[in-house]
Amino acid sequence: MIDELRKIGLSDLEARCYLVLHEEPNISGYEVAKKVSVSRSNVYAALRSLTDKGMCRAVEAEPVLYGAVPIEQLVRLLKTDFEQTAHTLLEQLQSPPRKSASFYNWQGDKALETTIRRLLSNADKSIVADIWAEDVSWFEESLLEAERRGVAVTVISIGECHTRLKHVLVHRRSEEWKYLEPRRFSILCDSRSALIGSFGKSLKLSALETDHPSVVELLQNGFYHDVIMDRIERDFGNQLAEKYGEHYDKLINPYREILE
């Protein structure tokens, strides 16, 4: 809970003091200091700051007693402030039209996680995600949230996966695929924003974000191909395996030297 309170602008000590007041209202700064095991001077400074931020209330007494403003009231206030700030920013800082497509490179776990969440939370109509089954957890919560907003979410899972998402197409893979590295992924949001990257033990996580029309079209074509192949394999799987091999080896083998 400390981390969550820090996200709304509290310091570590302020968060600890707020939790103490939340559990036991109307206690003195001296009692708060004993409970958090921090010097009284630092605790009184934190309590003054919480009072200035409107997150705790002081009762004039001898000594002064402090109590936490109920969390539901704080959350409503924060939501109102955020919505007003967001409205002002959108109104005053409209993005200028771009003259050309952009490419951005993201590296590292935190940067990649934040970028994924940003793109998925800004999708209005559709999301297509092409992901290995092992990596679905990186995307699942943000995709579920998009589904709850009414966004049409489709996941192409490379291998069988267990997920609460509604629309998942499973791309079959052979046993040798588990030795492949890296494991690529792609996301296409509203047919205009794309993220392409790779996971792998020996690789630093990285991804390319772009709105370039050629990349968008490439991902769209890949999605159409996956949808068509999923339906064909469900309808004619046995016949295809008999004619071309279980994993289309008879078709692919002549081109393996080119592909590898």
Image (tube, rainbow, N blue to C red):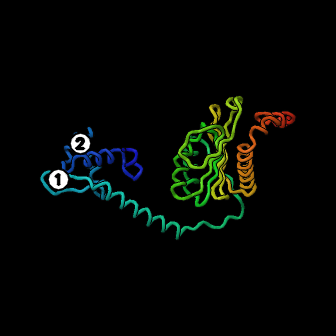
Q: Position of residue 165 (x, y in %)?
A: 55, 47
Residue at which label 2 appears: 33
Q: Quadrant of the C terminus?
A: top right
Residue at which label 1 appears: 64
Direction right: furthest residue: 254
Q: Residue 105, can we see it?
A: no
Disc 1, SS: loop
Q: Position of residue 171 (x, y in %)?
A: 68, 41
Residue occupying image coordinates x 64% and y 31%: 202
Q: Amino acid at mark 2?
A: Ala
In the rendered view, would you say 186 is above or below 260? below
Q: Amino acid at mark 1?
A: Val
* Badge 1: residue crowd in 10 Å (few <14, some 14–19, many ≥20): few
Q: Earlier in the sequence, mark 1 or mark 2?
A: 2
* Badge 2: residue crowd in 10 Å (few <14, some 14–19, many ≥20): some
| 3, 48: nearer the viewer | 3
Q: Position of residue 224 (x, y in %)?
A: 73, 52
Residue 260 left/right relative to 173: right
In the rendered view, would you say 203 is above or below 101? above
| 178, 214: nearer the viewer | 178
Q: How many marks?
A: 2
Residue occupying image coordinates x 69% and y 33%: 181
Residue 168 left/right relative to 258: left
In the rendered view, would you say 206 is above or below 54? above
